[in-house]
Image (cartoon, helix red, strand yellow):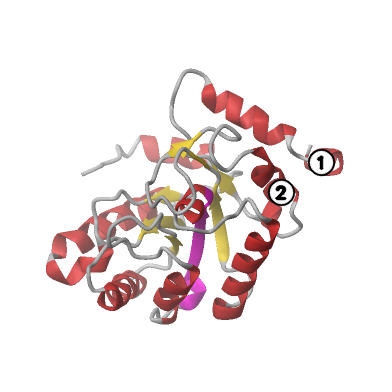
Amino acid sequence: MKRWKKKDIPTFRVLFENVPVFAHLSYLPNLARMDEDERHFKGLLHEVELCNVLGIDSLVVHCGSNRDREDGLIQVARAINRIHEKYTITILLENSPGHGYGIGRTVEELANIFHHTIWKERVLFCLDTAHLFQAGYDIRRKSTWNHVVQEIKALCGEQKIGLLHLNDSKTPLASAVDRHWHIGKGRLGIRVFQYIVNHPYLSTIPGIMETPKTDKMDEENMRVMRSLLSPLVSRSSS
């Protein structure tokens, strides 16, 4: 398990005091099958405790998988409730690409988990663009984005999208295969991201790219994303 040296903690806090930071749970803890093995919850708890030490107040989690979807949804919510009995950290539920028995493929499933939580003000959603596409949402269409946003608002309330994972997809629509790719070079294409960074609502949500670590593509992906901003947005954010 990860450990931090005490001398590193103040340095880390200085680095992110002016920048929003989101921790991310690994794929290993399967919250949708928490009741079958307590190690799944202990893995989540360990990461939450690390966040508490470091002063990070937001943690993105995968919902896990379960053959019994209804039971899986309830177990994820139960795991979150157990955390919130002790910690005030915000949990962000990330949508799934829909592979196997993955939980959280649809907005409806994420909303189902949300409605089984107790401290709803501490539960938000992290929408991954590649996962949405791989799960069957054709977000190349503006109408699909409008539908997703409105559905979340209708089912869970306003301002429940707390983070965007901005990734292109190497695999096609509804493939259920999770393969991230570089911005504008995958099946989603560049127009999706241009729409997001200039959208009145979506552009106000923090975004993180999780593209493959190849050569200097991090810098290139950032350059591409910045080039998509309209001149008005670019001036106001400089």
Work out which residue is located at the far left of the displayed protein and give it. Answer: 37
Instruction: Tell me the kind of residue under disc 2.
Output: Tyr
The structure residue drawn at horizontal position 70% and vertical position 52%, both measured from the top left corner, is 203
Looking at the picture, how far across and down is residue 160, in whole percent?
A: 57, 68
Q: Main secondary structure of the magenta part?
A: strand
Q: Could you say whether the residue bearing mark 2 is in a helix, strand or loop?
A: helix
Question: In this rendering, would 191 be left or right of 86?
Answer: right
Q: Quadrant of residue 19?
A: top right
Q: Nearer the viewer, residue 175 or 10?
A: 175
The quarter in which the N terminus is drawn is top left
Between disc 1 and disc 2, the foreground one is 2
The structure residue drawn at horizontal position 29% and vertical position 70%, both measured from the top left corner, is 79
The Cα–Cα distance between marks 1 and 2, rounded to whole angstroms, is 10 Å
Looking at the picture, how far across and down is residue 201, in whole percent?
A: 71, 60
The quarter in which the C terminus is drawn is top right
Q: Quadrant of residue 17?
A: top right
Against 1, is 218 above or below?
Answer: above
Segment tinted magenta in the rendering? 120-129
Q: Residues within 10 Å of mark 1 (few under 14, many from 20)?
A: few
Looking at the picture, how far across and down is residue 113, in whole percent?
A: 39, 75
Which residue is label 1 attached to?
A: 230
Q: Nearer the viewer, residue 220 or 235?
A: 220
Q: Residues within 10 Å of mark 2 (few under 14, many from 20)?
A: some
As for residue 177 lying within the magenta part, the answer is no
Q: Could you say whether the residue bearing mark 1 is in a helix, strand or loop?
A: loop
Which mark identifies residue 195? 2
Looking at the picture, how far across and down is residue 115, in whole percent?
A: 44, 81
Against 138, is 107 above or below?
Answer: below
Instruction: Tell me the kind of residue under disc 1.
Output: Ser
Q: Tag count in the figure?
A: 2
Question: In this rendering, would 15 be left or right of 77?
Answer: right
